[in-house]
Image: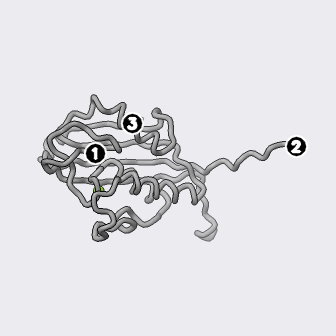
Amino acid sequence: MPATKHTPKIRIGYGFDSHEFRPGIPLKIGGVTLPHDKGLGGHSDGDVLLHAITDALLGAIAAPDIGALFPPSDPKWKGADSVVFLREALQRVRKMGYAVANIDASLILAAPKIGPHTAAIRARVADLLGLPADCVGLKAKTPEGLNLERAAIAHVVVLLETRMPAQKKRK
Ligand code: MG
């Protein structure tokens, strides 16, 4: 079968991102601002989780990655809300005829403790993706033995499924 005829019913996507902690800036993870004395540096708002989700969505449809679509060299994205990146990726997913089935994420960071904020982050990410919260997995780990205390890391997998065509109304 020619490759162009291959239209999978489901697609998997994987995203990874890391950002370095810097003092004096807000900490945004999953679109939620968390209380902490440091935030994540980067050209945009440094939201490591939203960046990894965005890349997972783009990867699932074999689109250009977040760095290609929103280059850090473009001043337009300086301090940008990373929700903008995620929305663009989601729009591309929908245009390809897919819907997000579920996502699963792992965050790796020494501090702050994510546990108290897990519910809020899952709810926000679910809202951004148009999913119920039980379709958003989130685990937080400390970087045991990795010597990565200055960074936050996110790994994300996403599953897409073909969207059901709208039901025609019967006369
Ligand atoms: Mg990033």
Label 2 sits on residue? 171
Quarter assignment of residue 170: top right
Answer with mark 1 or mark 2, whichever residue precedes in sequence: 1
Count residues near mark 2 (Cα–Cα under 10 Å), then give few for <14, some for 14-19, many for 20+.
few
Question: Residue drawn at (39%, 36%), measured in percent from left and top?
Answer: 122
User: As drawn, which residue projects farthest toward the top?
Assistant: 116
Which amino acid, by three-letter code, is at mark 1? Lys
Give the residue type at disc 3. Arg
Within the image, what quadrant is residue 121 found in?
Answer: top left
Q: CA distance from mark 3 to mark 2?
A: 41 Å
**Where residue 163 sits in the image (x, y, percent)?**
62, 49
Circle 3 sits on which residue?
122
Residue drawn at the location 60% of the way across and 63% of the way down: 6
> In the image, what residue type sits under mark 2?
Lys
Q: State if disc 3 and disc 1 touch (CB < 8 Å).
A: no
For the residue pair 160 and 124, the one nearer the viewer reads as 124
Nearer the viewer's eye, disc 1 or disc 3? 1
Q: Quadrant of residue 2?
A: bottom right
Would residue 100 be found to the left or right of residue 147 on screen? right
* Residue 93 percent location from the top left of the image: 52, 56
Above or below: residue 77 compared with residue 102: below
Q: Position of residue 136 (x, y in %)?
A: 43, 38
> Quick one: SS at disc 1?
strand
Q: Which residue is mark 1?
A: 28
In the shown orientation, is residue 149 left or right of residue 35? left
User: What residue do we see at 42% from left, 53% from top?
Assistant: 86
**Circle 2 SS class:** loop
